Image: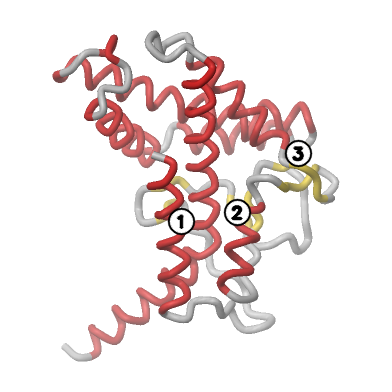
Amino acid sequence: MIPCILRSAAAVTLLSASVGLCQPNSPGAPPDPESKHLFWIVPNYRTSPSLTDYQPLTVREKFKVAAQDSWDRGTLGLAAIFGAENQLTNSNRAFGQGAEGYGRYWGASYGDFVTGNYMTEAVFPSLLHQDPRYFRRGAGGTWSRLGYAIGQTFWTHNDSGHGQFNYSEWLGNAAAVAISNAYYADNRNAGDNISQLGVQIGVDTAVNVLKEFYPDISRRLMRKHQKTESFH
């Protein structure tokens, strides 16, 4: 699972480089409106175009962001995909197979997403006074932006706007994995927990990369669509 996630992040970066997507909007131009979904499925409620004029989130706003990410149709869809993959690999034999077994896999995957969202975007950011948002860099070369996006998994901002280690990401996901032991009957040993933590962190890292480059990809695809329409 983790190699697939990292390959997906690399694919986004290579696409950006191949079509020249490392150019930001012209200086002084307002940022593009933030899409609530990336590729129509991945929830995108906690992305900020930049750190300019930084304003911290209140505790209530942090929980609102977690709720938006958790109860979104995209999260339901992603849980369906992860549930299917887990059933195909028979990762938790106690869930069984068939439609009933898939329901358990889907429910468990969705529980992973919801618990992870609340722990990393609301509970720990509120306790530790950290900001759960992804602040897009938007300028510079493709590889420097890639490094920045991956780095946000390890480095974030506190409510004062200063940088610090992303404790909320790591402690929040670790807490979510520990909670998941309650419904993963076959996966309760330390090795399984470490593997699941890696998956959670890997997903968040890949999504950060997608958030960094999505506006560039979206503008490029829009221009291609407009050119195609002009020929008809």
Which residue is rendered at x = 63% and y = 79% of the image?
29
Which residue is rendered at x = 42% and y = 11% of the image?
183
Residue at the disc numbered 3:
130
Task: Please tell me in which quadrant of the rendered image residue 201 appears.
Answer: top right
Rendered-image quadrant of the N terminus: top left
Against 209, residue 224 (above or below) is below
**CB under 8 Å between discs 1 and 2:** yes
Rendered-image quadrant of the C terminus: bottom left
SS of the residue under disc 1 = helix
Mark 2: amino acid: Ile
User: Nearer the viewer's eye, disc 1 or disc 3?
Assistant: 1
Q: Residues within 10 Å of mark 2 (few under 14, many from 20)?
A: some
Mark 3: amino acid: Gln
**CB under 8 Å between discs 1 and 3:** no
Residue at the disc numbered 1:
9
Mark 1: amino acid: Ala
Q: Earlier in the sequence, mark 1 or mark 3?
A: 1
SS of the residue under disc 3 = strand
**Spot occupied by residue 144 in the image (x, y as percentages of width and height):** 63, 69
Against 206, residue 62 (above or below) is above
In this rendering, position of residue 97 left or right of residue 12: left
Q: Residues within 10 Å of mark 3 (few under 14, many from 20)?
A: many
Q: Earlier in the sequence, mark 3 or mark 2?
A: 3
